[in-house]
Image (cartoon, rainbow, N blue to C red):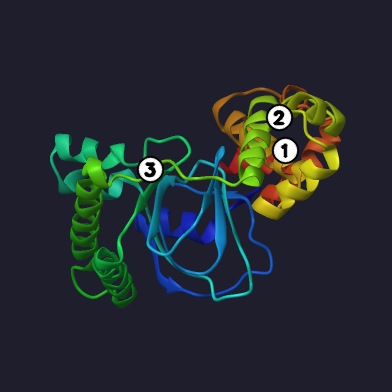
Amino acid sequence: MVIHTPTNLALQKLGIYVRANADDWQYSWPVHTHEGLEVYYFIRGDANYVIGDIIYELAPGDMLLFPGSTMHRVNPTKDVPYIRSYVNFTPSFLREQMSGEMFEKMMSLFEAPNGLLIRWSVEERSEMETFFRAIHRENEREAFGFEVVLKTMLVQMLIAIYRKSKRLHEFVPAQQQSHTQANVQRILQYINQHYRENFSLTELSNELHLNKYYICHCFKDVTGFTINNYVISKRIEEAKKMLLTTDEPIGIISDALGFNTAVHFSRSFKNYAGVSPQQYRKQGG
């Protein structure tokens, strides 16, 4: 798993990171986490988005709200342009902009462990797209008072999102999943519950009553990454938390997370996080 460094650097410096109508393509779309909260808005393309245990099959106008600390990964196809906008921000960036009651309501939008989906109608999309463009433009200019303006614009956008979320008759119904997506979600849920254990593909197959070759194929097809890579990503995510919140030795953490040896753990950690476990702990994340 990758920690999204540009996002974290921006959040640490200012408290907000924004992109509008981004259309760049990455050779590899990593499983990643980052600080703060995220408002992601899908404009165009053909993509699935995995957040925690849930797979979202995106349609234009879909918005996802989730904490950056939840593992997430988009899996777009290259057949059509992939266009999206998003803003990441820290709660402290907005804390003083509103009353305690309003702040709690805004933060409630990000409480769903696997993200919150809000689907904007064609008529409503222009307002959301205008918000993202305006916030991005203000952030790029860095003119006098831009931090105050950024906070004001972000609050306005979150209020519009909150109002939409409370229109119960318009609230998004449960997604109609395909048979394959339903099976991949079962696989995700099993892995997220058992990633500390050294289960085999055969054991996973027997537990879910699915052919192991089918499991490998459909998981990679829907999520874009292999089962093994996903398991390691989950373990590294937990390792990061343990490194920062406990004094447990590296060997103990390695054993607790199902790695065969401390050497294997350290090598895997550096491949995913960019630094060794010792360096990560020393740097404070």
* Vertical relation: 79 (above or below) 96: below
Quarter-wise, where is residue 77 in the image? Answer: bottom right
Q: CA distance from mark 2 to mark 3?
A: 30 Å
**Residue 99's x, y, as percent?**
13, 40
Could you tell whether 249 is left or right of 137 in the image?
right
Could you tell whether 152 is left or right of 239 in the image?
left
Could you say which is closer to the camera, residue 110 or residue 284? 110
Q: CA distance from mark 3 to mark 1?
A: 30 Å
Among numbered discs 2 and 1, the one appearing first in the sequence:
2
Residue at image mark 1: 231
Could you tell whether 115 is left or right of 213 in the image?
left
Is any atom of residue 66 visible in this view?
Answer: yes
Badge 3 crowding class, 10 Å Cα cut-off, few under 14, some 14 to 19, many 20 or more, is few
Residue at image mark 3: 173
Residue at image coords 62%, 32%: 189
Could you say whether the residue bearing mark 2 is in a helix, strand or loop? loop
Badge 1 crowding class, 10 Å Cα cut-off, few under 14, some 14 to 19, many 20 or more, is some
Among numbered discs 3 and 1, the one appearing first in the sequence:
3
Circles 3, 1 touching at the beta carbon (< 8 Å): no
Residue at image mark 2: 195
Q: CA distance from mark 2 to mark 1?
A: 6 Å
* Vertical relation: 93 (above or below) 245: below
**Residue 209's x, y, as percent?**
77, 28
Among numbered discs 2 and 3, the one appearing first in the sequence:
3
Circles 2, 1 touching at the beta carbon (< 8 Å): yes
* Vertical relation: 65 (above or below) 14: above
Could you say whether the residue bearing mark 3 is in a helix, strand or loop? loop
Is any atom of residue 224 visible in this view?
Answer: no
Could you say which is closer to the camera, residue 248 or residue 8? 8
